[in-house]
Amino acid sequence: MATEQPALLHDGQTAIWPRFRLPTGRINAAPWHHALSAGELVGTCHCGGYLKPGRPYQLGRVDWFPATCHACGADTAHRGPLPRGRKPTR
């Protein structure tokens, strides 16, 4: 299990590793679900600990991907892919 990865984006407290992010900066659902089922880590906490992924949940039309630090217990959640919707009308 590789833990020495550079962080891509920070929320001020935590950083999710690049392989779990889309080019837009949002969470990539497929590798997240794999990490969740395999018990892998997904990022780094401000305390220096590592983040374990949680089960995604939906609020409104937005999917959220939670993670918890195994060292200090800090929780975070990051947005998932953009929801599919109708094309904008003019």
Image (cartoon, rainbow, N blue to C red):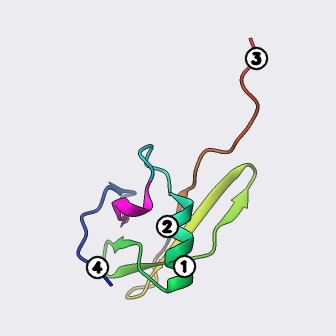
Q: What element carries label 4?
A: loop
Q: Is mark 3 on a helix, strand or loop?
A: loop
Q: Earlier in the sequence, mark 1 or mark 2?
A: 2
C-alpha span from label 1 to label 2:
9 Å
Report if residue 43 lies within the magenta region.
no
Q: Which of marks 4 and 3 is nearer the N terminus?
A: 4
User: Could you say which disc has been placed on residue 3 in the image?
Assistant: 4
Name the residue type under label 4. Answer: Thr
Q: Which of marks 2 and 3 is nearer the N terminus?
A: 2
Horizontal side, residue 85 vs residue 6: left or right: right
Neighbour class for label 2 at 10 Å: few (<14), some, many (≥20)?
some
Image location of residue 21, percent across then percent down = 43, 56
Asked if marks 4 and 3 touch (Cβ < 8 Å), the reply is no
On the image, numbered disc 1 is attached to which residue?
A: 36
C-alpha span from label 4 to label 1:
15 Å
On the image, numbered disc 2 is attached to which residue?
A: 31
Name the residue type under label 1. Answer: Leu
On the image, numbered disc 3 is attached to which residue?
A: 89
Q: Which of marks 1 and 3 is nearer the N terminus?
A: 1
Q: What element carries label 1?
A: helix
* Camera-side residue of 86 and 70: 86
